[in-house]
Amino acid sequence: QVQLVESGGGLVQAGGSLRLSCAASRSTFAINVMGWYRQAPGKQRELVAIITSAGNPNYAGSVKGRFTISRDNDKNTVYLQMNSLKPDDTAVYYCKAVSLSSRNYWGQGTQVTVSS
């Protein structure tokens, strides 16, 4: 079992930055892929960025060049640095972990609101 706790959300003006953190309750060395997803009101949850255990990232086209995902296995934490934020980035952001046995775990979500 893995518990994930997100933090770092908030309200920011367009063009600003936020950094989200997701702390896992067990060693991330036992976790394969970690990632960030988001869900805006009335929309489906969508992939934002993922990072493999080897540290290889992948991004949605809408955030590429603005967001950076990273993971610190010593701190059991994955981060999402979000720059040049736009109102369209407003959503609840969820952390996801996929264990080595392919089980999925989700955090409770953190709200990001970008004002124009």
Image: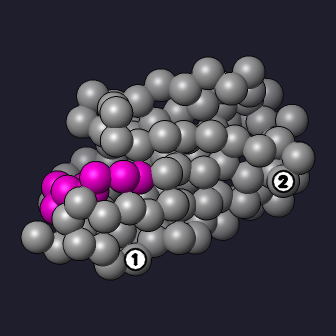
Judge left or right: residue 21 versus residue 101.
left
Say whether residue 36 is visible: yes
Q: Residues within 10 Å of mark 1 (few under 14, many from 20)?
A: some
Rendered image quadrant of residue 67: top left
Provide the secondary structure element on which disc 2 rests.
Answer: loop
| Residue where numbered disc 2 is placed | 75
Provide the secondary structure element on which disc 1 rests.
Answer: strand
Q: Position of residue 102 (x, y in %)?
A: 70, 29
Q: Decide which of tag 1 and tag 2 comes sooner along the chain.
A: 1
Query: Looking at the picture, which amino acid does disc 2 mark?
Result: Lys
| Residue 56 among magenta residues | no
Q: Residue at x 69, y 42 (%)?
A: 71
Q: Which sits in the foreground, 95 or 62?
A: 62
Q: Is residue 88 above or below residue 37?
A: below
Q: CA distance from mark 1 to mark 2?
A: 23 Å
What range of the chain is rendered magenta? Answer: 82-89
Rendered image quadrant of residue 51: top right
Say whether residue 92 is visible: no
Q: Position of residue 10 (x, y in %)?
A: 40, 77
| Residue 88 among magenta residues | yes
Q: Residue at x 66, y 66 (%)?
A: 5
Query: Looking at the picture, which amino acid does disc 1 mark?
Result: Gly
Q: Position of residue 42 (x, y in %)?
A: 16, 60
Q: Residues within 10 Å of mark 2 (few under 14, many from 20)?
A: few
| Residue where numbered disc 1 is placed | 10
Q: Is residue 15 above or below residue 30?
A: below
Q: Residue at x 38, y 62 (%)?
A: 17
